Image (cartoon, rainbow, N blue to C red):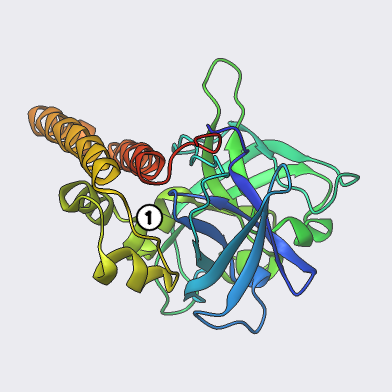
Amino acid sequence: MGHDDYWVAISREGQLLGGGFFVTSSYVLTSTACLPGLRTREPLDLHTARGLPLRAMVYELAEDVGLALVSVLPDPEADCSAPQADNAVKGDEWLAPYRPGPARTLLCGTVDAVVPDRRDGGGRPMCVIELAGDPPPGSCEEYAGGPVERRTEGQDPAVIGILLDSDASGRLSDTGREALAAGALSSAFEVFEKLSAEYLVGLLGQGIPGASGAEADSAFTVPPTAPRRTEEASEAFETGRFMIREMNALAAENPLLARDMRPYYMRLANEVCDEAFRKVYGEPDDD
């Protein structure tokens, strides 16, 4: 991870709305409950774990599964690499690192069940991670949108899901009752095209996006780049393309690996994009 933690606090006009977390260097995942009444392209303020402010806007809303994607303007002073992602299994210990204030309790517990196909009526399917923990679900509303990490002893920490608000968890429950639950990170990759393995891998083949790419998606102005820095950034993408080819070959040799490769494609694409941004914008202490 970077020097900043990967989770953020989301606010608008000085009012705290909820939590979220980087899933790529340009996008933050959160809950629609954290963006009440907001529409796409409306501005937001983010603050990293150490308080660094970032400019952002609502990019896409997926009301049927209670998830939202926020586009973030890159900042050379921010070092917010996305975390390692993985799948949850029953019995995993979990921790929610985002909390709505320093005096608030950290949520933690164990994974009670992983249900692969839940729907809100005719909505898209969502893999729901049912969570057991203390305090009770009713007191966890302000934590919605934050990441849920696996903290099982003997395994590396990894993000397994996004904490759902009580309304979304109730709509995605087979009983209709509100419960403490998270949406699996793998489902978010399927809901949002910008997080799909195909799109992230495609970035590695496109090099540095021009005005019709990054600028159109984010609606932010990107400063012109010196030719030398652009060339160095392109070298980072070439390295990423080589690794992608090797990963594809590995998956082709063993099809059983293919279904579990998506988090690694995401991690690689994010690392390559981070390196490219560093080449383009320079390190925070560069002259």
Estimate the x, y position of residue 48 in percent, counting from the top left. Answer: 66, 48
Residue 126 appearing in the image:
yes
Describe residue 113's horizontal placement relative to residue 45 as left or right: left
Front in this rendered view, residue 242 or 93: 242
Estimate the x, y position of residue 8 in percent, counting from the top left. Answer: 65, 51
Q: Secondary structure at mark 1?
A: helix
Residue at x 60%, y 24% (from the top left corner): 152
Q: Note whether 141 is above or below 230 in the view shown.
A: below
Residue at x 66%, y 71% (from the top left corner): 33
Describe residue 64's horizontal placement relative to residue 16 as left or right: left
In the picture of the structure, the residue carrying the numbered disc 1 is: 189
Estimate the x, y position of residue 278 in percent, counting from the top left. Answer: 41, 39
Crowding near the residue tagged with mark 1, few <14, some 14–19, many ≥20 C-alpha atoms within 10 Å? some
Q: Note whether 282 is above or below 198 in the view shown.
A: above
Residue 178 appearing in the image:
no
* Kind of residue at badge 1: Phe
Residue at x 43%, y 49% (from the top left corner): 24
Front in this rendered view, residue 19 or 223: 223
Report the residue that reaches farthest toward the right: 103
Report the residue that reaches farthest toward the top: 154
